[in-house]
């Protein structure tokens, strides 16, 4: 009987066993369905019965004699996954631990990408978030033992799998079709993480694993870092009491090198001057992209991850099982970097251009406009914590009625973990640059810099800095009650109610010195002894064009420069080395550390009451077994968004290109409320056409709630305003708590042929029609703060442009104002600052972005094909699958109007080859994902196609002792992101392979 993901693979000696398809089998199939319906994947966590218990419920007929075939390792994991897929209602895929404490991959997301329709996003070379059937992490619900889990992203709902160690996980199930018993939130899928339960494996079970990790990407970190994991499980008092304790500790040092462009300015081709310096000049109607800033960066991370779990179970009588469990996860991430960059105006002075109508620079050159050559250094740290305490009680009241109660209180939190905050940078700069040219025709652009004199430490000055803190915390308190009642041997009903209280908090602070221009910088030579000459030559060799990058720059320790800057601030103002004091300081009293007092805060509360009923029926038609399930789920959600928004006192023009909005000490409070309700039907049907062929059909309606960043109630602005070529750039955002959830109508059809114990072929088609997508609505030239006067919107600025001409540079305009209006209000020649004055200067205006539900309906459809082949006695086998998705929710690159597109929509392919025999296990895995849209409303962003090879091998020295080695990204693949055209680089990065060697002891 295939019923439980952890059951043994069995075969029947009695030839009549395959399969008793008539009534004698119906009861057994009913027991399986009830167990699966009420298992940990459902929103109400009722733990499934043991196989023996389910078997005992079958009619009292002569049972066949069964011989158990013991299967371990890779093949055991595949057998359990096949059982789950074949016997589940709807479309369900699973990955199961190969042994206690041994998951197929060291990262859960890396394992999940092996499933058809599942792809992942990587951070720092490790799987982080998942996309299912083209729907990104915000559209997928993650549960732990059937309980909704909080996230710590602050603005999004996506779950970060990098927090969770795989060694403490028994299986992961991906529910691609919905059912009434599953909590809402997964239009793409509901993914349930299951942890071991001691009463499921009676007796003493223990495992200890030790690894040494070598990450080739790190330059400054340790060559090898440790990972230790262990689990101990024991039952007592005739297996009525069970205790399970597991934990893991991991360190990892890694690095990354890459290039990025901070933004692309898009203009009509007519904006490109016809000055004789253009090659293939764009047509006037072409859409042309101009680069803002090219950055080359090298960075290092140190990660420390701790996971712990404890589970207590008690079954005082056979009909009652109580479970108390606590889960803890902690991830500390320390980050440091150095970079150099080139800032462009951008005025399109000289370029070689691609063909239209979407035009990108192949080579872009500017001269004389910008004289600075900035270099940045950063040191920051953050800490993620997760805690979950839960209680579950299952009571088999009668042979026909089972009830369950489940409660949990779970928290996810992200906080700064350094005096410098969770995002810190100090820049130094030389002002000897005459021009720069960047070649965008290669994978990573190549920049050539023209300077007056060779780069010297004596030319470097301290310029701007940012020390930011961000906090996020989500609490979920959830109570669920429900059960199952068996009307007949063929029909039973699931029912339940739940109350979920979700509270999400996000806050931040910023200590920022906007002295990026030369006039606000420190004196020359103030950091000459703190910088180390270096070159970018050889840093980007894995990226196309990277071998041609050989710019010289300086490395420096941000901490040392911050200490030097604090000393310079304390010098007398008439000292030539004096550094201007920051307007607002952090906890250290200066502008060179972070502020632990939040400058803004957003809190969003969602209270959801839900109820469901679900009817399950099994029967036979033409002597073939079929299953049908119909369910209905109702939910009511009340939303309250409260916020504290930053107020501002004035705008200072403190350096050539930056107009800085100066925050006030007072905040602007607000509170908004809304509510909505949904009724969601679902229907699943499957039938076995033959003993080995099953077909399925499913229909459901599902929802996914808008992201917290879209629902937030606070108003925020970009505190650095700019005037480029006479055009004002100032942006603001405000959320919309009244957003309705995304609603999807889903159809699924599939066929599966199980032609061997571990071998099958499946093909599935899915279609989703989604409405209420969240999109942008923008208001232009909005005055948000009537008293916030802008110095470029008044008579002093107008007088300067009248005298110098509208094409005058900001530097010339500033000099004119200082020369001709030195005694005017707001003009401070000593500090080189020009401030807006209310009544004289007009208030600043902003382009304000908010969120609305789009009236457009998106249709997504696709095919999933999987082939799993086990060559039985040879020990060899393979898994191959592919997903092909399509839809009308794509971005039209030819238009720069605001539009909606679905992030994450892409084709994927996977191949896994394995060998498992004689104590030797070898697995080689290949993963490929096509280009996909990642975001953007008026300007798109894409991630380029990516492929990766991983491999692992192990040898069982004894039945208890195994040694192993594994490699991740063994071919050293790189990643790239781009804008409207592949030539319009957003980022290109290289990390490196990661290797692990270790041993595992199991008792």
Image (cartoon, rainbow, N blue to C red):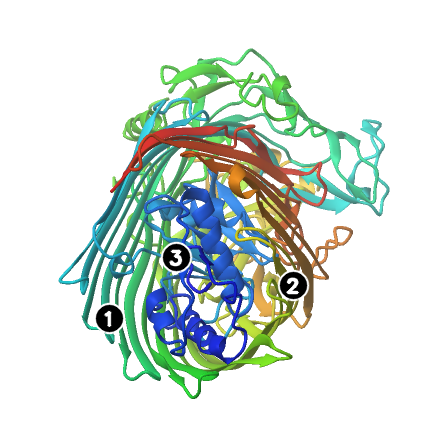
Disc 2 is placed on an element classified as strand
| Residue shown at the point (35%, 80%) measured from the top left | 482
Between marks 3 and 1, how big is the CA–CA gap?
Answer: 19 Å
Where residue 902 sits in the image (x, y, percent)? 63, 58
Q: Report the side of 452 relative to 382 (left or right).
A: right
Where residue 782 sits in the image (x, y, percent)? 58, 63
Q: Which quadrant is home to the C terminus?
A: top left
Q: Which of 476 and 156 is in front in this view?
A: 476
Residue 345 location, quadrant = top right
Q: Which of marks 2 and 3 is nearer the N terminus?
A: 3
Q: Residue extending furthest left?
A: 237
| Residue shown at the point (39%, 30%) measured from the top left | 996
Between marks 1 and 2, how big is the CA–CA gap?
Answer: 37 Å
Tag 1 residue: 321
Disc 3 is placed on an element classified as loop
Where residue 839 sits in the image (x, y, percent)? 51, 59
Name the mark on residue 419: none
Name the mark on residue 6: 3
Q: Nearer the viewer, residue 611 or 714?
A: 611
Instruction: Classify mark 2: residues with Cα within 10 Å, few (<14), some (14-19) or many (20+).
Output: some
Name the mark on residue 751: 2
Where residue 795 sits in the image (x, y, percent)? 59, 50
């Amino acid at each position: 009987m295939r019923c439980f993901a952890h059951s043994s693979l069995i075969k029947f000696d009695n030839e009549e066993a395959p399969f008793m398809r008539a009534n004698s089998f119906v009861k057994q199939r009913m027991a399986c369905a009830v167990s699966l319906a009420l298992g940990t994947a459902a929103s109400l966590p009722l733990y499934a019965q043991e196989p023996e218990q389910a078997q005992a419920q079958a009619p009292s007929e002569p049972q066949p004699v069964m011989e158990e075939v013991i299967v371990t390792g890779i093949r055991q994991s595949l057998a359990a996954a096949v059982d789950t897929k074949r016997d589940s209602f709807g479309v369900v895929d699973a990955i199961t631990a190969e042994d206690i404490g041994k998951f197929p991959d060291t990262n859960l997301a890396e394992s999940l990408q092996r499933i058809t329709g599942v792809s992942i996003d990587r951070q720092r070379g490790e799987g982080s978030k998942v996309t299912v059937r083209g729907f990104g992490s915000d559209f997928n619900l993650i549960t732990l033992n059937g309980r909704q889990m909080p996230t710590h992203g602050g603005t999004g709902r996506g779950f970060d799998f990098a927090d969770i160690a795989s060694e403490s996980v028994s299986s992961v199930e991906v529910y691609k079709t919905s059912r009434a018993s599953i909590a809402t939130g997964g239009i793409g899928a509901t993914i349930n993480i299951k942890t071991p339960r001691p009463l499921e494996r009676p007796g003493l079970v223990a495992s200890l694993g030790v690894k040494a990790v070598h990450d080739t990407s790190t330059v400054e970190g340790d060559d090898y870092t440790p990972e230790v994991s262990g689990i101990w499980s024991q039952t007592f008092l005739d297996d009525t009491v069970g205790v399970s304790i597991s934990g893991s500790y991991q360190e990892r040092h890694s690095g990354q090198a890459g290039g990025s462009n901070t933004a692309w300015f898009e203009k009509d081709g007519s904006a490109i001057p016809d000055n004789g310096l253009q090659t293939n000049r764009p047509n006037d109607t072409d859409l042309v992209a101009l680069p803002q800033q090219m950055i080359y960066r090298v960075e290092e991370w140190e990660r420390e991850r701790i996971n712990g779990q404890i589970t207590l179970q008690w079954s005082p009588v056979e009909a009652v099982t109580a479970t108390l469990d606590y889960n803890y996860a902690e991830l500390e991430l320390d980050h440091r970097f150095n970079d150099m960059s080139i800032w462009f105006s951008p005025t399109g002075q000289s370029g070689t251009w691609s063909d239209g109508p979407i035009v990108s620079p192949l080579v872009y050159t500017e001269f004389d406009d910008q004289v600075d050559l900035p270099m940045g250094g950063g040191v920051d740290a953050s800490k993620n914590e997760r805690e979950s305490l839960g209680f579950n009680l299952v009571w088999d009241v009668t042979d026909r009625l089972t009830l369950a109660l489940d409660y949990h209180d779970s928290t996810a939190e992200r906080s700064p973990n350094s005096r410098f905050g969770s995002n810190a940078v100090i820049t130094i700069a030389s002002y000897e640059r005459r021009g720069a040219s960047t070649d965008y025709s290669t994978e990573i652009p190549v920049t050539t810099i023209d300077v007056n004199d060779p780069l010297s430490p004596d030319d470097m000055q301290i310029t701007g800095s940012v020390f930011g803190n961000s906090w996020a915390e989500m609490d979920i308190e959830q109570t669920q009650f429900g059960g199952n009642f068996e009307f007949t041997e063929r029909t039973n009903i699931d029912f339940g109610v739940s109350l979920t209280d979700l509270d999400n908090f996000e806050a931040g602070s910023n200590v920022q010195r906007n002295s990026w221009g030369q006039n606000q910088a420190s004196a020359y030579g103030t950091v000459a002894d703190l910088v180390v000459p270096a070159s970018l030559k050889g840093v980007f060799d894995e990226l196309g064009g990277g071998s041609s990058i050989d710019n010289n720059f300086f490395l420096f320790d941000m901490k040392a420069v911050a200490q030097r800057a604090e000393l310079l601030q304390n010098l007398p103002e008439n000292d030539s080395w004096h550094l201007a004091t920051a307007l607002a300081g952090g906890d250290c009293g200066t502008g060179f550390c972070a502020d632990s007092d939040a400058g803004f805060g957003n809190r969003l509360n969602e209270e959801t009451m839900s109820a469901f009923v679900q009817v399950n029926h099994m029967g036979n038609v033409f002597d073939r077994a079929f299953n049908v399930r119909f369910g209905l789920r109702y939910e009511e959600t009340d939303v309250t968004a409260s916020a504290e928004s930053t107020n501002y006192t004035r705008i200072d023009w403190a350096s050539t290109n930056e107009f800085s909005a100066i925050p006030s000490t007072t905040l602007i409070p607000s509170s908004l409320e809304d509510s909505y309700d949904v009724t969601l039907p679902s229907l699943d049907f499957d039938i076995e056409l033959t003993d080995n062929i099953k077909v399925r059909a499913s229909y459901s309606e599902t929802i996914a709630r808008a992201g917290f960043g879209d629902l937030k109630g606070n108003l925020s602005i970009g505190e650095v305003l700019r005037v480029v070529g006479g055009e004002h750039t100032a942006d603001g955002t405000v959320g919309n708590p009244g957003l309705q959830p995304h609603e999807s109508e889903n159809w699924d059809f599939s066929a599966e042929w199980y032609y061997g114990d571990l071998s099958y072929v499946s093909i599935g088609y899915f279609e989703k029609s989604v409405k209420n997508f969240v999109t942008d609505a923008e208001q232009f030239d909005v005055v948000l703060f009537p008293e916030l006067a802008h110095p470029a919107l008044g008579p002093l600025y107008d007088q300067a442009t009248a005298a110098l001409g509208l094409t005058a540079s900001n530097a010339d305009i500033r000099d004119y104002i200082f020369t001709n209006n030195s005694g005017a209000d707001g003009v401070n020649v000593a500090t080189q600052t020009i401030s807006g004055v209310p009544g004289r200067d007009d208030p600043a205006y902003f382009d304000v972005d908010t969120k609305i539900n789009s009236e457009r309906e998106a249709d997504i459809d696709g095919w999933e094909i999987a082939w799993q082949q086990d060559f039985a006695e040879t020990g060899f086998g393979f898994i191959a699958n592919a997903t092909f998705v399509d839809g009308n929710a794509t971005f039209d690159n030819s238009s720069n109007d605001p539009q909606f597109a679905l992030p994450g929509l892409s084709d994927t392919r996977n191949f896994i080859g394995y060998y498992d025999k004689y104590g030797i296990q070898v697995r080689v895995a290949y993963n490929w994902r096509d280009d996909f849209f990642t975001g953007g409303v008026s300007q798109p962003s894409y991630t380029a196609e990516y492929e990766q090879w991983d491999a692992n091998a192990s040898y069982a020295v004894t039945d208890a002792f195994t040694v192993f080695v594994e490699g991740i990204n063994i071919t050293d693949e790189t990643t790239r992101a781009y804008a409207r055209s592949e030539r319009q680089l957003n980022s290109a990065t290289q990390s490196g392979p990661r290797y692990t060697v270790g041993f595992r002891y199991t008792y």
